[in-house]
Structure formats: structure tokens, C-alpha cells
Image (tube, helix red, strand yellow):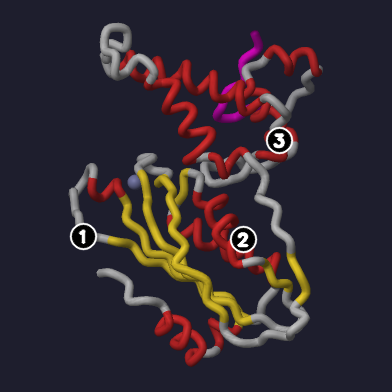
Amino acid sequence: MSRVSPVSAPKIFRSEEELAQMPASERIRWRLVQADRRYHANDNISAFMREGELEELKAEVQAKLQEVLQALVIDTVSDHNTKETAKRVAKMYLEEVFRGRYVPMPAVTEFPNAERLNELMIVGPITVRSACSHHMCPIFGRVWIGILPNEHSNLIGLSKYARIADWIMSRPQIQEEAVTMLANELQARVRPDGLGIVMEADHFCMHWRGVKDTESAMVNSVMRGAFLKDANLRREFLSLLPRRKG
Ligand SMILES: [Zn+2]
């Protein structure tokens, strides 16, 4: 079996036959490298995956997690609690908590701003869950989105904001990058005059390890367009958010 180094996969030709024999992760990585595409923890790679490969990845991850348990010297044969752990965690990663890397963006219908709405609109709090890319520890948070539409803006249904946020957050993330990614996606889709996003989150790598600080929440914001230029608008948006804790 041919092996491609995960660190610097070279650009080389591979026949369909060769590709079929590779583990799915190497096959997908090969396509990404050929296309010069980044595949960081918070990148979506769904365009480089084919039908059935998510299942293949799940089996691969399960086998590797089994090795991790072995390396931790955990007896997964007699310990009934850990017998299925590798399988459960692989499923949780691929189908739930990191799903936003492997599936395309949820379908969002945009409709023209027929009513020519031009008032500040606030969506939130949207509950989001993520994991930090540094420790893969959970992040639980709330997001508020402020939109100032103009007559050329496309509007999207309220529930779609939550769907897009979930798709972006369900990846190993860094909070600052996550809010920027969400802002870019909404900016491209809605094309408002102003866009503001505030995210407040609890990072479990602060609670579970390290300093074990149980009080700290991290707050991030991104302001674009009118929210950046107009201090009154920004103040109005921030004042309309329910009192955040901390
Ligand atoms: Zn962390």
C-alpha cells in the first residue's frame, strides 16, 4: 500500500485504482494537495470527499482511537465501559462535533429585501458548541448577530442563522477565527450595510485542565461596515443584547 506523509504530501499523479487502495484519509488529502487547498482543523473539506468516504473515515478514526486507548494502557477487552469507546468517539467526531468539516453548508434560501427593511435586526442568542483546536476540549457559547440591511441585501430565514453558525462551529475551532468565518459567510450571503457578531463562550480547556478557572468566559466580536463606522449603531446593537454573564 502506498503511503503519503500527512505533513507534506507530494504532488504526484495517482490512478483511480491507486486511489481506491489508499485509506480514505490519504485519498482525500491527496485531492486537497492536488488542488492546493488548505485543510486546517476549521476548514470545510466536503468538496473533496466522495460518497461513502465519511463512513470510511469513521472506521479509520475508530481504529486509531483504539490504538490511543491501548497506548493509555486501558483494558478495552475486560472493561465493559471502554469496549465500544473508540467506535463511539469516532462517530461523535465525524457525525456530531466535527461534522461541519465534512458536510457542505446547509441549504439556505435567500430572498430579496422586498420590504426594503433598513432597521437594525438582531438574531440571538444562538447556542453554539464547538471544540478548541488546541486541546479538542468543548467550547459552549452564545452568539448574537446584528444586521443592518439595505434595499439590495438578501434576507435569509431566522433559523438559517443558527444553521450556518452550527456548521461553522462544529469543527475544531479558535473563537476569534470562528466569528470571522461566520462573519465572512453572512457578509457574502446577506450583503448588508452593517454586520456585527458577538460571541461569548466557555472554554473547557480552562475548566478541565490548566488553571481550572471556572469563571472565565471569552467574549469576541466582529464589526463590519456601518457597525465599524457608526459608534451609535454599534452602541445600539450592544445595548440590545441581553445582559451577558461575567
Ligand atoms: Zn484549548
- Magenta stretch mostly in which secondary structure? loop
Label 1 residue near ligand 1, CB within 8 Å: no
Mark closest to the chain's N terminus, 3 or 2: 3
Helix or strand or loop: what does disc 3 sit on?
helix
Answer with left or right where residue 148 lies relative to residue 241.
right
- CA–CA distance between discs 3 and 2? 24 Å
Q: Position of residue 116 (x, y in %)?
A: 73, 85
The residue sitting at 66% across, 50% down in the picture is 106
Helix or strand or loop: what does disc 1 sit on?
loop
Q: Which residue is the site of mark 1?
A: 215
Q: Amino acid at mark 3?
A: Phe
Q: Amino acid at mark 1?
A: Glu
Callouts 2 and 1 close, C-beta under 8 Å: no
Q: Which residue is the site of mark 2?
A: 160
In this picture, is 207 found above or below 93? below
Q: Which residues are magenta?
A: 1-9
In this picture, is 40 found above or below 218? above
Label annotation for residue 48: 3
